[in-house]
Amino acid sequence: MSNCCRRYIPLTHAAVVVSLVSLSTPNPAAARSRAAATRFAGTRPARIDAVRVDGHGRTTTVRVRATRPCRVVRTRLRQPERLVLDFSPARWGGDRPTHHGKGSVRAVRIAQHDGGRRVRLVVDTEPHPTRWNGRFRGGEWVGRGRTQDPAQEACRTRPGREPELMSSDHPLRALRRMVIGIDPGHGGDDPGAISGSGLEEKKVTLGIARQLRRLLKRQGIRTVMTRTDDRRLRRESRIAFVSGGRANLIVSIHCDALDGSPHCTGITTYYHGGSRRSQELAEALQRRLTVATGLPNRGARPDTTCYDSGFYVLRNATCPAVLVETGYISCAPTAARLRDPGYRLQVAQGIVEGLKRYVRAAPVRTARR
């Protein structure tokens, strides 16, 4: 097993409190999410004691009863179509969710996460896109969704143009509706892996992240980064970043290392075990990265192959998230390439093409409150 799998165990140090920097244009949804996080910080968890889901025809109503309002991150996922609601701080204290009416609802699931601080509700609906809205009304969160008419969806066109979903620039337009989270691994007094020539992983990851941000910005795609300079983030800061609802997709950038195997190299992309959407993102990036860099393809793998619980930066994410190993810094020829800004640009270009491939195959739209 590689050192990377051991290296990601977070260390507890006194650290500088880092303000996560947004380098994108103002994002009202993200601002509301941050405001909600501040509003409910330090409050006692709300007790959620009842969930009722009613489906009639193409309309679905979700009612969540709580002892007090709390923060809600609302995420719409595709293939299969479903609504994910994360309530925090909150704890589950009711019976199994009730589901009435046939309608478009297929299943309702609920689980407790983050040591009793977050309650996740998942509503599986019919495969056709469903538009959602919702808010707290007193002690009850009420959300409504309406499944789009499949016939209207398939026939949506503009005069003199092909259907929008078939347009060649659809991936770019889809990405422009998103915010891409970029996490350069390590930083500050945590250098990560170090090559035999003294190259530090933290410098490589930040260099690639800056190239990636630049490429996305040129194409009108918004980004947020965990760090933009050489500083170490507290574990809590990274967890807040991946779970705070600021990004629609998250890419964490690292370098691999393996003691005693100086010739081992290649690209690996990890996703959190059990997350289908993250797996699809990992597979899309992995294909493009191996083409862009020419390094061996070591595959898209679940992070549970390294640890039973996976990587904390992935398992706490509330949106599709992956961790990319951009090459083995313990391999001298690969380390020489990782030092080269031209290679870092190749990696960034591979990630961009992977993001386009991902949204082309299965567009994702995320709503936050």
Image: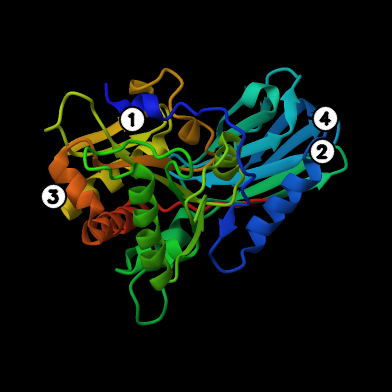
- Left or right: residue 34 versus residue 366 is right
Q: Nearer the viewer, mark 3 or mark 4?
A: 3
Q: Amino acid at mark 4?
A: Arg
Disc 4 marks which residue? 44
Q: Amino acid at mark 1?
A: Cys
Q: Amino acid at mark 2?
A: Glu
Q: Residues within 10 Å of mark 3 (few under 14, many from 20)?
A: few
Residue 259 seen: yes
Q: Given the current orientation, which residue lies at the most extreme bottom position?
A: 160
Query: First in sequence: mark 4 or mark 1?
Result: 1
Query: First in sequence: mark 2 or mark 3?
Result: 2
Question: Which of 230 and 264 lies nearest the eye of the viewer?
Answer: 230
Q: Amino acid at mark 3?
A: Gly
Residue 4 circle label? 1
- The residues bearing labels 3 and 1 have C-alpha atoms spaced at a distance of 21 Å
Q: Nearer the viewer, mark 4 or mark 1?
A: 1
Q: Mark 2: which secondary structure?
A: strand
